[in-house]
Amino acid sequence: MCLLSQREQACITVLQTVPYSSKSYLIVETFNSMSANAKILSEWYFQLARHLETGVPFPEAWSLPAGPAHKDRRENTRQLQDGASIADILRHSGHWLPKTDRALLHSAAASGRLPETCQQLAGRHQRLAQARHQIRRKLLYPLLVFHLAALVLPLVRMINFEAGLSGFDLSAFSLQIAALLLPLWSLIALGSYLANTRHPALYGLLRLFPFLRSYAREQSMADFCDVLGSALAVGITPQQAWQQAADCVHAGSLRRANHTVQAVLEKGQDPAPAIAAIPTLPKDFIAYYQTGANSGKLDSVLLDLSRDYELRAINKLTAATAFYPGIALLFVGGMVAYSLFEFIGSYLDLLDSFTG
């Protein structure tokens, strides 16, 4: 059931021209704080779906006070009230609305499935918020221990049993603390900046770390299948659907696969054999794509596959939250053990000087 006004329906065809710059989106939003918070987006999408289902006009539903408090969203609301089309809103939504969300809303508006898609996006952001909360909770204790160790260990190493605290060097103490904490906070700041600006480099950064590399790969496939399936479901041509899906990810393997498929589609050929010959595509994606294409239910098959990839991504993220805190605690434990040995050695040397 389509819940858009006639004026908005007339603008939907313009949505085909909405650009999706690959430089403005990054799959991994786990560390993103500059764009709308995942929990806030989830609640907003739930309310948006509920209002649309009851027949509330889209401009009024969009401007719900419970939505993300972002200047671009406020500007979008004003534009809607002034008569702007949905296409204009999606085109100028800015970073507060993730690019995958824009692509899915694009397809939903073209098919009159906005309420269902908003429910889907609400569930996705709810799962993201839960994963983010889990990460913060599991990282809190190792971070506290690390900071405590960074304060205590330099002090222990600087204790002189003969001179006491009279030989304490505050500058050296501060430098040792900075040497321990500066790399950690530099990495946190870099990750936050890349996530906040949705910089493509974050995808490459995550690929340097175990589990996070797998998470980025699985989440990329989840978003790719989600956008591709949604686009095909509303009748968008396979060529356009593949391009939209590729524009929403930073995975080089998917972008190269899109170039191959585009070349085949331009010739009017069946892309299934070409897809099967692409070694960088997951085997399960190839198998499901062929099954869906043969059964005539490619869109629904891809949407189901997207849920599977999303579940795998969450599992990888959960594994990362167990692995990296453990590494951090081992590192802190090693520093504590080293400092204790130094401390005991100094103490024994002092005893030897007394007994000698």
Image (spheres, rainbow, N blue to C red):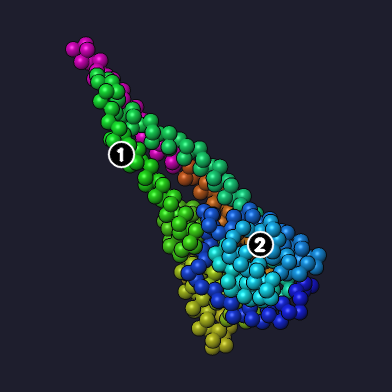
Name the residue: 40% across, 36% down: 332
Q: Is residue 217 above or below residue 338?
A: below
Question: Hey, what amino acid is under mark 1?
Answer: Leu
Residue 231 visible from this viewpoint: no
Q: Find disc 1 in the rendering and name its residue.
A: 175
Q: Earlier in the sequence, mark 1 or mark 2?
A: 2
Name the residue: 76% across, 69% down: 57
Q: Which mark is residue 121?
A: 2
Q: Nearer the viewer, mark 1 or mark 2?
A: 1
How many numbered discs sit on the rendered protein?
Answer: 2
Name the residue: 55% across, 84% down: 265
Range covered by the magenta-colored residues: 327-356
State which quarter of the image contains the N terminus. Answer: bottom right
Q: Which class describes the residues within 10 Å of circle 1: few (<14), some (14-19), or many (20+)? A: few
Q: Is residue 12 magenta?
A: no
Q: Is residue 337 magenta?
A: yes
User: Magenta stretch: dominant SS?
Assistant: helix
Quadrant of res 224: bottom right
Q: Nearer the viewer, residue 86 or 327?
A: 86
Helix, strand or loop status at disc 1: helix
Name the residue: 50% across, 83% down: 263
